[in-house]
Amino acid sequence: VLLDAVISAGPMPALELTMQFAARRQAVLAHNIANIDTPNFLPIDVSVPAFQRTLAQAIDARRAAGGGMHGPLDWKPTRELAQEPDGRLRLVPRTPSPGILFHDRNNRDVERLMQDLAENVGVFRLATDLMRHHASRVRDALAERV
Amino acid sequence: MYGALDVSTSGMVAQRVRLEVISANLANKDALVDADGRYSPYLRRAALLAPGDPASTSPAGRSMGVHVAQIRIDPDALRRRYDPGHPFADEQGYLLVPDIDATIEQVNAMEALRAYEANVVAAEASKTIMAQALRLIA
């Protein structure tokens, strides 16, 4: 129970959800890049602002329920964000917009794809760095006790 | 996380196969006889890509990535050339030769190469994410 309280305290659940989102989205972006020359292929993606809204709502709800940054993060599934039976995040990507098609009916946009890829790695890196920082503070606190 | 790497690998495999097909077209652009020595001008081939990876071991992975659905042989990729002295020429002095444009093949090869590189970049990004996740344990 003590360990649960330590793990679900502060920003840990939000960071974990962000990492799950970035890791799953990485596969989606890789899929779009793998199909950059595939005729009739329309890229798929999930909305990052929509995920951020879901995350913000879950954080607000946790704050309202517990009066602070404690307890698990209870996020609500949306059309693009599904929940596995074990509570993990599953993405349901869609085609954002048909856009302009090339002669092979593929609406690739390589610059935007590469930008999304770089941003996604940045988000994952930020979440893991913050998580490591938080974990080291927890370790320091525990070391003071023993 | 390994799923993203599988997806990029499927992209690299597909582009490599495409490049091999283009190389074969270029190498055989003047080939008039088959392996047994019979007159059979080489027909241009094209790799057709389709989304999904049937080789993937996971059900979720089968809908992601890309694969070569077919290597299509173009039966009409022949043109008539006037060469009356040629041993394979007909009564009018014409023979059928492969209709392969080296410039088009070069452009396709460049496109395949760039697409391959894009997949390498995506795989590198996935590796960065994996390394970053592993650093949490260390």
Image (cartoon, helix red, strand yellow):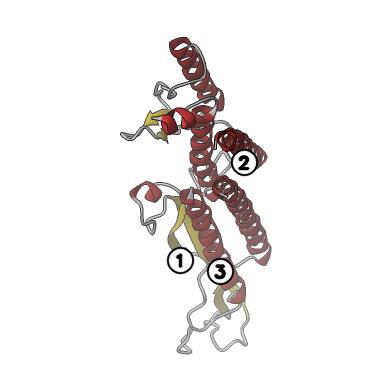
Where residue B119 appears, x then y in whole percent? 59, 53
**Label 1 to label 3: alpha-carbon separation:** 19 Å
The residue pinned by badge 1 equals: B75
Label 1 sits on what residue type? Pro
Residue behind mark 3: B20
**In the rendering, which numbered label is found on residue A121?**
2
Pointer 1 and pointer 3: residues touching (CB < 8 Å)? no
Please give the chain letter of the residue carrying mark 2: A
Note whether residue B59 is visible.
Answer: yes
Structural distance between the alpha carbons of marks 2 and 3: 32 Å
Inspect the image, locate mark 3, and give the three-letter code of the amino acid beneath it. Glu
Above or below, comparing residue A106 to residue B85 in the picture: above
Determine the residue positioned at 38% across, 50% down.
B62
| Residue pictured at 53% horizontal, 50% vertical | A34
Please tell me how crowded label 2 is: few (under 14), some (14-19), or many (20+) other residues with Cα within 10 Å: many
Give left or right: position of B18 versus A125: left
The amino acid marked with disc number 2 is: Val
Secondary structure found at label 2: helix
